[in-house]
Image (spheres, rainbow, N blue to C red):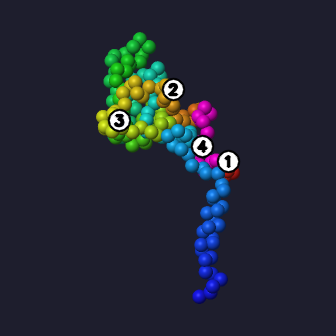
Amino acid sequence: MKLSRYGQGIAKGMALTFKYFFTKPITTQYPEEKLQTSKRIRGNELVWVPYKCTGCATCAKYCLQGNIEIVTNGQTPDGRYAVEKFEVDIARCIMCGLCVESCPFDALYMGMSYELAAYQRGDLVLSKEKNTIGEDKQPSAYFRPNLEKVRPAQTLLIERPKYGL
């Protein structure tokens, strides 16, 4: 056994430790600071635009799991159906996006949210008030390329300026 190799592994390990000891950490403190996700994220919510919806229920027909329930109440004078009930069971949804792709009037979008959690399964059935577009509901650019210009840039760790991307 050569004495010149004795402690070489420890020295390499300590050199690497000291290298990262003096660099700025890239940790994100999650609840207070959030990173922007991809512009085309298929988040765990659907965003519904009621003034564009005609109540045709095409989205419900294309849903593989049968998670979308639409109840309409007759036709309005402008040829649309009055949507009384628009519910989505997010607990069973596989976020495939077929409902968004099938909507002929661009009334349904995938959402940007990724924090939908609940203690009870029944709380994951979203009514039309919880699905309606608003300040807390931001539509994703999934299958809607015209929204890519207005969505914020992605801020994942690999895209930080330190890495030159």
Percent x, y for residue 164?
A: 69, 51
Residue tagged 3? 124
Q: Which residues are magenta?
A: 148-161
Q: Which residue type carries mark 2?
A: Glu
Q: Are marks 2 and 1 in contact (CB under 8 Å)?
A: no
Percent x, y for residue 129?
A: 40, 24
* Secondary structure of residue under mark 4: loop
Q: Marks 4 and 3, how far apart in space?
A: 28 Å
Q: Marks 1 and 3, how far apart in space?
A: 38 Å
Q: Which residue type carries mark 4?
A: Thr
Picture layout, residue 127 above or below residue 11:
above
Residue tagged 2? 135
* Secondary structure of residue under mark 1: helix
Which is nearer the N-term, disc 4 or disc 3?
3
Residue 123 located within the stretch drawn in magenta: no
Q: Identify the disc placed on residue 161.
A: 1
What is the quadrant of residue 85 in the picture?
A: top left
Q: Residue 49 vs residue 24: left or right?
A: left
Mainly helix, strand or loop, the magenta region? loop
